[in-house]
Structure formats: C-alpha cells, structure tokens
Image: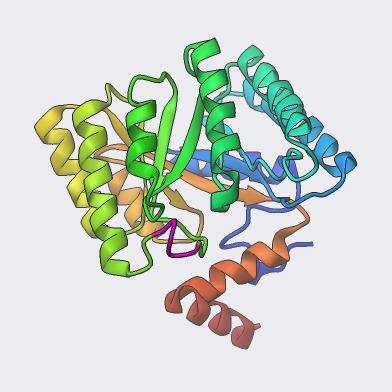
Amino acid sequence: MLPPVASRFVAGESAATVLEHARKMNESDIGVICNRLGEHYHERAPADADAAAYERLVADIGGSDLRACISVKPSQLGLFVDEDVFRENLARVVAAAAAHDVFVWIDMEDHTTTDATLDAFEHHARERGGGVGVCLQANLRRTAGDLERLADCPGKVRLVKGAYDPPKDVAFREKSRVNEAYRTDVEFMFREFDGGIAIGSHDPAMLTLAADLHSKHGTPYEVQMLMGVREDAQRELAGACDVWQYAPYGEKWPAYFWRRVRERKENALFALRAIASG
C-alpha cells in the first residue's frame, strides 16, 4: 500500500484511486490529468500493457462525470523499444480516448525524444482536429522554433521550464536564461496562438505574466501544476482561470516520490516531518 508520506504526491496505486482523487479535486473546480507511472521501457511487453491500461482508464473516465484526462510518456509506450511500437501504442490510446471523448497529453522527455514526440503529436492533432496535447520545454534552444511550427496546429501545448539536464549546446543552463526564454515563449503563445495554451509552472511570476497576457490578448489558457505542490495556490487560481492538476498513480511510485522530495526544500521538509511524526 502507498505510505501516507507519499500520498501527497501520488494518487494511489490503482486507477480507482486516481479517479477518486479526481472526484475530490473536481469539488474544488480543479481538473485532473491522470498519469500512470512507468517509463524507459526497453521491451515491448510492458509498453503494450501500459497502453492497454490507458485504454481501460479512458473508458472509465468516459463513463463518469469526472473532469479528467490522461497523460502518457513516449518511452512508456515503447519509444525506446522502437519508434513504430510507440506510434502503434499511441494510436491505440488516442483512438480509445477519442471514442470516449477524453483528452490525451503526450509528455516530453529528454531532448533526444523531441522530434519523435512532436511528429506523433502533430500527426494526431491535425488528423483529429484536436483532442491531444504536447509538452514543450523552454530550456531547449529549439523551443521557439517548435512553437512557430505548432502555432496553427489544433490541440494544446503545455509549456514548462524543463526538468531534464540536457547539454549546453542544445539547452540554456542558467536559471535566469531559462526564465527569460519561458517569458518570451509565453508571450509568443498568447500573441500567436488562438487557444490551447497550458502554463505548466508553479512560479508565481510566470502565472502573473500569463494572467496579464490573457487580459491583453484575450487568448484562452489553463494552468497546470503538480499534485502536492502549491495546492493552496491551485485552489485560489481555480476561481480565476482553468486549473488542472497532474496526478500520477501506479505501483512504480517510489522513484517518482523521491524525485519530488529532492526537487524543492519544502517537499523535503514535508517528508521529514511526516516520517518523524509517524
């Protein structure tokens, strides 16, 4: 069973638990992006199994009144096995989601996967006229060009600062330079996109920038934040804009949980207090 200390960041081990979490968050006007934990598969069997699990999940979401969708990782669906395996499994998931009117986010992983991820996203977005989204990372030097490519593409684009550690020839490494790139990219999106903008950030400055740009341009947008991180701010923002929470679930929670703990001092202190009180 999931220990209480990890339940702040992970919505349980089963699909039933993440759907119950979604129901609770919906009561606060927050939608939930359900992500089954699993990535970097190098054999086809687990990739196929996770694709099938997502097919069942979208059927459950489609049969409910929940404000929820899903997010998949390319390496989870077989990209490191073979690109064709990834494309086949993604097509299965997207088709099942479309049948149940459930949105599909495609996460972005390290910089070596960017081309395959964007190609797959654009294929499904243009073929279906939407229904899918993709994540772009502002720390990559190529992102400004990728945004230009996707400006007229149906679907959605989530912009994050970037959590991976790419080499300096492909990415900005200084925090100030990443922030500058994020601001420039956000301004471009509000100016050139008709909609489909997702601000994936916990940074108050970037959230304020998005609100200001929305007031200036009128472009629709949503805010996406992680489960367990600034949840008070998520509830406050839900009264002013469309807010979605990224909620992982599944048996592969230990690695994800410890990654969240290491990321921010506040998360580490929370974990230490929980362990000490237990």
* Whether residue 63 can be seen here: no
Q: Residue at x 52, y 79 (%)?
A: 268
Specify the quadrant that holds the N terminus. bottom right
* Whether residue 162 can be seen here: yes
Please state if 45 lies on the left or on the right of 157 as rendered: right
Give residue 272's quadrant in the image: bottom right
The answer to whether 247 is drawn above or below residue 167 in the figure is above
- Residue 224, given in percent of the width and then of the height, sits at 41, 45
Kindly give the residue lying farthest to the right in the view shown: 45
Q: Residue at x 18, y 30 (%)?
A: 191
Please state if 125 lies on the left or on the right of 147 as rendered: right
- Write the start and end of the magenta stretch as one range: 167-171
Main SS, magenta region, reads: loop
Specify the quadrant that holds the C terminus. bottom right
The answer to whether 197 is drawn above or below residue 256 in the figure is above
Please state which of residues 16 and 80 is positioned toward the viewer in this rendering. 80
Please state if 160 lies on the left or on the right of 34 as rendered: left
Q: Does the magenta-highlighted stretch encompass residue 69?
A: no
Please state which of residues 220 and 120 is positioned toward the viewer in this rendering. 120
Give residue 198's quadrant in the image: top left
